[in-house]
Image (cartoon, helix red, strand yellow):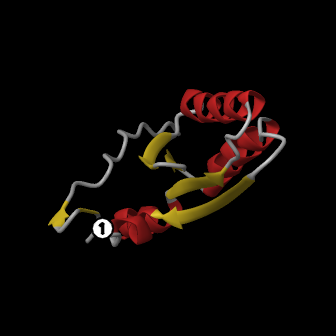
């Protein structure tokens, strides 16, 4: 395996945003919807209910997106951020019921030097 490719698998990150937000009142539901929509506008996709992920080409890029999400955090509830390297993400097993399912696609990357 090419050393550059192997190193990239440890440099490329997946950002996870997990959240548990209240939905009791109309305002809570509005904040919940606004938060989800803002995540999607920033390129996050739903992995499971209340778990969104985004591919990031570097730690610096991941921090930019995490900072951006922090600007639209809802006033109530819990939000958790964590990152996995591409190599760690590759080892996750996905199932629907008892059947293995497909992993989210890795976006095409364009590197400019």
Decide which of 103, 107 is in the foreground and name it: 103
Residue 35 falls in image quadrant = top right
Q: Is residue 99 left or right of residue 87?
A: left
Vertical comparison of 92 with 13: above or below: below
The quadrant the N terminus occupies is: bottom left
Q: Residue at x 70, y 51 (%)?
A: 63
Q: Secondary structure at mark 1?
A: loop
Decide which of 29, 11 is in the foreground and name it: 29
Q: Residues within 10 Å of mark 1 (few under 14, many from 20)?
A: few
Q: Residue at x 81, y 46 (%)?
A: 76
Vertical comparison of 99 with 75: above or below: below
Vertical comparison of 10 with 77: above or below: below
Q: Residue at x 29, y 64 (%)?
A: 94
- The residue that mark 1 highlights is 2
- Residue 57: image location, x then y, percent: 52, 49
Residue 97 falls in image quadrant = bottom left
**Which residue appears farthest toward the right when viewing the image?**
75
Vertical comparison of 22 with 81: above or below: above
Number of labels in the image equals 1
**Which residue appears farthest toward the front when viewing the image?**
24
- Residue 5: image location, x then y, percent: 36, 63
Q: Residue at x 33, y 49 (%)?
A: 104
**Which residue appears farthest toward the left when viewing the image?**
99
Q: Is residue 61 left or right of residue 10?
A: right
- Residue 71: image location, x then y, percent: 81, 37
- Residue 108: image location, x then y, percent: 35, 39
Decide which of 66, 5 is in the foreground and name it: 66
């Amino acid at each position: 395996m090419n050393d550059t490719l192997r190193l990239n698998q440890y440099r490329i990150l997946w950002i996870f945003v997990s959240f548990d937000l209240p939905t009791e009142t109309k305002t809570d539901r509005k904040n919940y919807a606004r938060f989800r929509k803002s995540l999607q506008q920033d390129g996050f996709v739903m992995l499971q209910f209340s778990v969104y992920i985004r591919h990031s080409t570097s730690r610096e890029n991941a921090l930019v997106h995490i900072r951006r999400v922090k600007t639209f955090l809802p006033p109530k509830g819990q939000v958790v951020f964590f990152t996995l390297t591409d190599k760690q993400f590759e080892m996750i097993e996905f199932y629907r019921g008892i059947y293995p399912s497909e992993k989210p696609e890795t976006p095409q990357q364009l590197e400019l030097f």
